[in-house]
């Protein structure tokens, strides 16, 4: 990568911001192109070069540059849109360039992705998208300016529908391949979504389309600490459609809200609120004072359960194996009747603080592929691989088995994943309940969600969907130990 020269010396390894892995930015060098585009380029480059997360590096860059309002919104749209559509953008660039996109120098490749996204998915005039991208290439790979200009002019010769018609496989002979290129998802993810939707490819397309939209910000008004209607008025939002604690925001920086800073609310997808609340409202005979969150980091569900526990005289034990995430849980539950344990949830029975048959309600929000939140984490769809599934599903079964050991006879376990992949949902629950060594009954989860919610299926488990419910694709199974 060739960087700008001058008194600051060679910045070729760091780019303009020199983003550290997964966060952190260094002193910037002024670009020769407009600031929003350059910030977007640096965020995209950090994601691809450093395995950074866009939701971490981009806000830091925006703050560093003092970008706000329309400029920040434009940089955000370019960053997230380019990352979501990378697969299709790469196919188009490959065709337009006459060479595989992976053979293009990485900084130039990222600039071309950014320019192609502007040409095909925004209202930016073609001449502005081409010229601004060529200016950008001039700063990061000056020898490639002519090449970039020629590629972008070829890209501009068709709209996105024209490119899909040229490059996508036939809907009749390869429907999965067609959807994958048309809606920019890896084929294995499209196949998994289609299977979870019963093979309905029309509905699968609706889901993929929703995955490519910018998701709203959801707040959770903590029970006993904030009223959702009053909170909505306070923050300029609207009460949620389903969760009794949800507030929808149109945008902005939720972390800067007084309600969030004061612990009266936290940022949490409405689907996550619904599945945590389902465990709390499920009918239970006998004692109901000892609750357990077996995989609590970073603390959103523990915060909601802790607030509900406080209202009902219960106490929550929140377990998190990663030390930094355990600290996040402590911060998220400060002032609530929550004890945080930094340990592995699979140690139930071996750890005296996690005795067997002790807890009345247990939540297992298991680590998963995160395929249900791809709209919020645009880089995840390209990082996840089918090879991730075997170790994750083994861990999921072990954690659910540990939860079934931890709950008392007659007590309840809610198994939750932010993935609709059937191997992480139905297969995991069926296998764990079969192998745990004691009788387990499925509780119909549908009545535990708000009345009138559409598309909840035949039960007893529930799968939420972005295109049906406006939530992340959360899966919920509720089990009662016999």
Image (cartoon, rainbow, N blue to C red):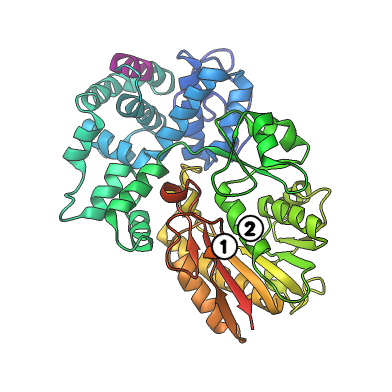
Tell me the SS state at disc 2: helix
Q: Find the distance from the CA under tag 2 to the CA under tag 1.
A: 9 Å
**In contact (CB < 8 Å): disc 2 and disc 1:** yes
Residue at 46% over, 72% down: 427
Image: 308 above or below 394: above
Image: 476 above or below 129: below
The magenta region covers: 126-134
Tell me the SS state at disc 1: strand
- Foreground: 391 or 309? 309
Residue under pointer 2: 276
Residue under pointer 1: 416
Secondary structure mostly taken by the magenta-highlighted segment of the chain: helix
- Foreground: 472 or 58? 472
Say few, some or many: other residues with alpha carbon within 10 Å of mark 1 (under 14 / 14 to 19 / 20 or more): many
Magenta segment includes 129: yes
Numbered mark located on residue 139 in the image: none
Q: Is residue 292 left or right of 16 when viewed as pictured? A: right
**Counting residues from the N terminus, which is met first, the one under dot 2 or under dot 1?**
2
Residue at 40% over, 31% down: 110
Choose top left, top right, bottom left or bottom right for residue 347: bottom right
Residue at 38% over, 62% down: 196
Q: Is residue 248 left or right of 132 when viewed as pictured? A: right
Residue 157 point in image, percent of width and height: 19, 24
Say few, some or many: other residues with alpha carbon within 10 Å of mark 2 (under 14 / 14 to 19 / 20 or more): many
Residue 319 point in image, percent of width and height: 73, 62
Residue 435 point in image, percent of width and height: 56, 83
Q: Quadrant of the C terminus?
A: bottom right
Residue at 70% over, 52% down: 304
Image: 333 above or below 192: above
- Foreground: 48 or 368? 368
Image: 67 above or below 78: above
């Amino acid at each position: 990568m060739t960087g700008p020269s001058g008194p600051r010396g060679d910045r070729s390894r760091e780019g303009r911001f020199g983003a550290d892995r997964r966060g952190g930015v260094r002193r910037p060098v002024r670009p020769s192109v407009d600031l929003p585009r350059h910030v977007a380029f640096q965020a995209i480059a950090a994601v691809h070069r450093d395995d950074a997360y866009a939701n971490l590096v981009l806000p830091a860059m925006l703050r560093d540059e003092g970008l706000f309002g329309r400029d920040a919104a434009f940089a955000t749209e370019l960053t997230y849109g380019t990352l979501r559509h990378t697969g299709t953008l790469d196919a188009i660039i490959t065709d337009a360039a006459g060479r595989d996109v992976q053979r293009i120098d990485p900084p130039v490749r990222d600039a071309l992705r950014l320019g192609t996204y502007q040409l095909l998915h925004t209202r930016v005039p073609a001449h502005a998208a081409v010229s601004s991208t060529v200016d950008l290439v001039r700063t990061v790979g000056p020898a490639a300016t002519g090449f970039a200009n020629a590629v972008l002019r070829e890209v501009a010769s068709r709209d996105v529908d024209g490119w899909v018609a040229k490059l996508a496989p036939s809907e009749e002979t390869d429907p999965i391949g067609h959807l994958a290129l048309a809606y920019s998802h890896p084929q294995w993810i499209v196949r998994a979504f289609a299977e979870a939707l019963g093979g309905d490819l029309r509905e699968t397309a609706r889901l993929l389309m929703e995955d490519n939209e910018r998701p709203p910000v959801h707040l959770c008004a903590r029970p006993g600490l904030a009223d959702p209607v009053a909170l909505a008025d306070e923050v300029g939002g609207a009460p949620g459609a389903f969760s009794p604690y949800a507030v929808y925001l149109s945008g902005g920086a939720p972390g800067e809200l007084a309600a969030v800073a004061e612990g009266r609310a936290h940022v949490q997808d409405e689907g996550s609120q619904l599945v945590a609340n389902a465990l709390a409202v499920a009918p239970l005979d006998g004692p109901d004072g000892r609750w357990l969150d077996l995989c609590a980091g970073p603390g959103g569900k523990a915060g909601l359960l802790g607030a509900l526990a406080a209202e009902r005289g219960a106490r929550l034990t929140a377990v998190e194996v990663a030390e930094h995430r355990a600290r996040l849980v402590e911060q998220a539950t400060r002032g609530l009747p929550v004890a945080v344990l930094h340990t592995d949830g699979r140690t139930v029975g071996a750890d005296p603080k996690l005795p067997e048959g002790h807890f009345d309600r247990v939540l297992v929000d298991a680590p998963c592929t995160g395929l249900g939140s791809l709209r919020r984490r645009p880089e995840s769809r390209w990082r996840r691989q089918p090879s991730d599934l075997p170790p994750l599903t083994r861990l999921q079964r072990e954690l659910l088995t540990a939860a079934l050991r931890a709950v008392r006879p007659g007590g309840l376990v809610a198994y939750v994943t932010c993935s609709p992949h059937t191997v992480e949902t139905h297969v995991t629950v069926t296998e764990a309940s079969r192998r745990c060594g004691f009788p387990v009954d499925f509780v119909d989860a549908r009545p535990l969600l708000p009345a009138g919610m559409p598309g909840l299926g035949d039960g007893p488990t529930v799968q939420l969907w972005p295109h049906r419910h406006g939530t992340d694709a959360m899966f919920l199974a509720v089990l009662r130990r016999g």
